[in-house]
Amino acid sequence: MNNPSPSLSWTVLVSALAALIGVCLAALSIQGQIADYAQAKSQGQSARDRDRNLAQLHALAQATAGERSSLETLFNTDVLSIADTLKSVGKSAGSALQVSDALPESAPGVQESTPALQAIAFTVKGDGTFAQLMTALSLFEALPIPASIEQVDFVHTPAEGTAHNSPPWHMEARIRVLTAAKLSP
C-alpha cells in the first residue's frame, strides 16, 4: 500500500479550505448584490408611488379649483353684507325684520388652528303673522351663506280691538354665521 505523503495531504487540505473560503465569499457577494437590488427596486417603487401620488394630488387640485373658489367666495362675506342678507329675508317673507347684536363667538367644529374662520351670532327680531315669520325662518335655513338657526322664540302679541285676520306675532331668533372676513376689534 502506498501511503500518501503528509505534504500532499496538507496541500489538499489547504486547497479545500481555500475553495471553501472562495465559495463563502462568492455567496456573501451574491447575497449583498441581491440585497442591493431589492433596495434599489424598493426605492424605485417608492419614487414611482410618490410621483403618482403627486400627480393625483395635482390633478385633484386642478379639478376642484372652481369649487374652492366658490367656497372662498361663500366664506369671505363681510358682516354688513350678511346683515343685509338677513334683512332681505324679511322683505321676501312679507315681514319687517331688524338685525342687531352681531357678536363673535366660538363655533363648534371650528378648530383653534383655523383662525381665519369665525362665527358671528346675529339677533334677528321681527313682527308679522305666524305664517310670515315661519316663512322667514325657512328662508334663513336656505340662505346662500353658511348659517344655522341656534334659537327661536315666538311670542303671540294680540292686537287690541281687532278681531279680523291673524293676530301679529313677535319672533326673536339667534342665527350663527361662519365667515372668513376680518372682524374689527
Image (spheres, rainbow, N blue to C red):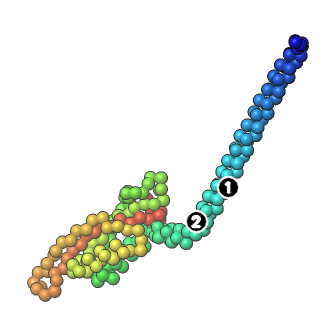
Assign a secondary structure to mark 2. Answer: helix
Q: Position of residue 170 (x, y in %)?
A: 21, 74
Above/below status of 60 relative to 94: above
Q: Position of residue 96 (x, y in %)?
A: 28, 79
Question: Which residue bears the numbered disc 1?
Answer: 48
- Front residue (pair 105, 35): 35
Assign a secondary structure to mark 1. Answer: helix
74 left or right of 6 in image: left
Above/below status of 140 relative to 17: below
Regarding residue 184, the answer to whether it shows in the image is no
Which quarter of the figure has residue 126? Answer: bottom left
Tell me what residue is drawn at x 70 percent, y 44 percent. 38
Q: How many marks?
A: 2
Tell me what residue is drawn at x 45 percent, y 60 percent. 117
Q: What's the residue type where badge 1 is placed?
A: Arg
Q: Residues within 10 Å of mark 1 (few under 14, many from 20)?
A: few
- Front residue (pair 142, 50): 50
Question: Which residue bears the numbered disc 2?
Answer: 60
